[in-house]
Amino acid sequence: MKKKTECIFEGKKDAKNKTKLKSVYTQLFITEGELNEVNNEHETLKVLKDKAFRGQQSLEKPINCNEIFSRVGNNEDPNKTVLTKGIAGIGKTVSVQKFLLDWAEEEANKDIDCMFLLPFRELNLLKEEVEQCSFHKLLVEFHPGLGELKETKMLEDLQLAFIFDGLDESQLSLFKVDSMVKTLKKEASVDSLIANLIKRNLLPKSRIWITSRPAAANQIPSQYVDLFTEIRGFSDKQKEEYFRKKIPNEDEASKIITHIKKSQSLYIMCHIPVFCWITATVLQEILIKKQEQDVPSTLTEMYTHFLLIQLNMKNEKYDKEVERDFTKLMESNKGMLLKLAKLAFEQLKKEKIMFYERDLTDSGIDTREDSEYSGLCAEIFKQESIIHEKKVYCFIHLSLQEFLAAVYVFYSYLNKNMDDLQFFIDIEFPKKLQLDHLLKKAFDKAIDDEKGHLDLFLRFLLGMSHESNQERLSCLLKVIQHIKQWQNKSENQNLSPEKAINNLFCLLELKDSSLYNQIMKYLNTETLPDRSLSLSNCSALAYILVVSEQLLDELNPKKYNTSNTACRRLIPAVRCSRKALLAGCELSMSCCECISAALQSENSPLRELDLSDNYTLEGAVKLLCDGLKSSHCKLQILKLVCAELVSAIYSIAPYLKELDLSSNGLQDSGLNQLLTGLEDSYCKIKSLKLAWCNLSQKSCNFLSSFLKASSESQLTDLDLSNNDLQSSGIELLSAGLGNPKCKVEILSLSGCMITEEGCSSLASALRSNPSHLKKLDLSYNHPGMSAGGLISAKNEDSCPFCLCE
């Protein structure tokens, strides 16, 4: 096992790319997750959206890969089945390899006697070979040494671990067969054997680790899984660590890190380890050749450079020459490149990333006779010999498959190969297919695809069109206009945030920044916009704000004259705002998650938050409490309608200057709890608004004690309007107001059912402590004749307050 796992290959498998795993391995960010519904978005783009919109890596506790079978919480039993999901290229297989290597070198999981790696791609081939077999025979196929084991009972007594890598590649019919298998010798189909192992009918003591891309993860019913985890790729710190390990020259590494930080989309995509490798390969080559004027600024340019490097590597090895002209280089490798591009496109349409011999044959690739194959394919295409010496193939990363698929479609257009373009044109072809017509159709096809598996392909196709068609600029302008019209349509209510953001990327791939500039105008204008911001542009605006790290003085979604649905699309921008006015936005659970993440983010700029007039979901209370209690939360002004959050306010009390809890069902008990917490936390609050909080005379007693408690009190504005305090309550409150420690300057008692007796108590208090009060609101009360006493107090030089009757 140690021999199999101690080395890693970046790119093709040969001695040049062979590296000791431990010398380059960078710890990935793995966190506990959930088995959610199937993802309806392109998984690579999901990384960008999650990074920008959730930004929660710093909040979640990472899980060490070697500890996935460890105990959780107070559970005395270790996890028996773990399901880990992660997008293509995020590091699932490398994590498995590191896990096996550490076990083989006795550095981790020493309680496990034997580990078996059973990749689904190999189980697929075994299923084709054998109709039925025993589980013992299945293990022998992967580990022939077990054939000498005469008594299988020994395996049942050992602590075993089975690792199933690549559930998304599985062609097995798991959980669709009913046969029961409880012994190692009973024969059944491969599907049934694996299902019975996962169901715990077979080898119930064993531990199981399954890895999968997100879209396939729910093939395993949740009742059979003890722990769900998710690999999020590299954190920002881990990205830098990777580049410095990959590039020994410190100056080169620093230059590369600086460049990718300038492009937020490239920088965020470097969460994916394979993309880090592609980026390092391209930028290192450019720096070595001192061609810094050629540094890629778009995704298409990055992948074009990468392909150029791989083609030159093939030329150096087989043709002993280097060709710098991209057109000539492509022409000299045209035959095999088109075969690979066709394979990429055909399999992308089927949403497949693993191919078998028959798939290559269908695309005209003969691995046995084609000399070109051993050259070009080896650089951008991987083949692995697996069970029974059969081979399985894939591109070095899904994004390279999408890039080559776009190459094939663009080539088909140039050569008028209409059959291959039928995928986009579902009606009779026009006699002369214009490029803008094809690109519009490709755009519409990607928009309509709910899973988003064509989104990155579309960006590449548009990028190639720009690079190759400067002389056809008018054609591209039509496509740009088509995308912008889609983006600006207010009726496109069902366009997801991911699609809206990808549309922005598409335009940037065409090097058109007009939509970007149009969206930014909404931020730079002092006056209200003359038309509402569309749903799509709300998503794009939030994304631009977050990834650019531009600090916003005020986020007020209502300012853009949008619907509540559109308002919610802007919520992620809370992370980069000083003031967030979110009153009446009908916040969803995901909105509250964004707000909580913003409050918990390191160096959070948020100082004012208005959440009033929102119906708070039950599950959202905990999220918001976690945010308010965070040590990073430095809110100074808070307005909310949720009595359940009162306990969390104590954590931010030292920073809080204004607290508006109006229209909460706070009641006397809630206010008592709040004031006790504020008093204990040395708060410096200046404004406290408690209008319409269902308070009675009891609350006046609590407030009176609070006003008298500390000489350090800075409370100057107290609003108790529209509470049933009555005169008896005002008499209690007056004891606090008359205390010299009280510094209240503005007191609002409108609509508090105060009669003549209450006003008399107030007049007496104001004469006792006359120097602070500047404004007193007694409107909608019944002061009677005692109002004269207040007016008399007002007219005294030592008590010059404004009386609102």
Image (cartoon, rainbow, N blue to C red):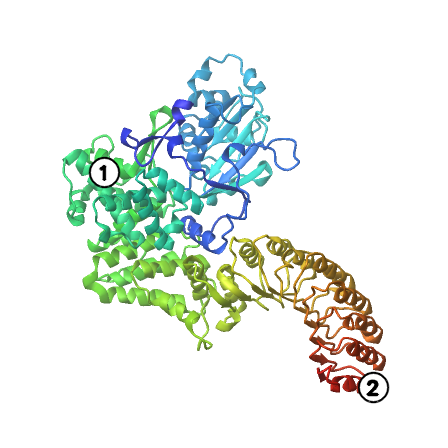
For image coordinates 49% across by 20% down, the residue present is 136
Inspect the image, locate mark 2, and give the three-letter code of the amino acid beneath it. Answer: Gly
| Residue 22 in view in this figure | yes
Determine contact: label 2, label 1, CB under 8 Å.
Answer: no
On screen, residue 296 versus residue 805, left or right, reads left
In the rendered view of the protein, which quadrant contains the N terminus? top left
Q: What element carries label 1?
A: helix
Few, some or many C-alpha atoms within 10 Å of disc 2 (few <14, some 14-19, many ≥20)?
few
* Disc nearest the viewer among 2 and 1: 2
In the rendering, at what x and y percent does residue 177 appear? Answer: 53, 34
In the rendered view of the protein, which quadrant contains the C terminus? bottom right
In the rendering, at what x and y percent does residue 552 appear? Answer: 47, 65
* Vertical order, 707 against 193 (above or below): below
Q: Nearer the viewer, residue 253 or 792?
A: 792
Q: Nearer the viewer, residue 367 or 279?
A: 279
* Vertical order, 152 against 262 (above or below): above
Picture quadrant where residue 617 is located: bottom right
Inspect the image, locate mark 1, and give the three-letter code of the amino acid beneath it. Answer: Leu
**Which residue in the structure is indicated by mark 1?**
376
Q: What element carries label 2?
A: helix
Q: Which residue lies furthest to the front in this view?
A: 798
| Residue 412 in view in this figure | no
**Which residue in the structure is indicated by mark 2?**
784
For image coordinates 15% across by 43% down, the residue present is 323
Q: Mark 2 or mark 1: name the one nearer the start of the chain.
A: 1
Picture quadrant where residue 49 is located: bottom left
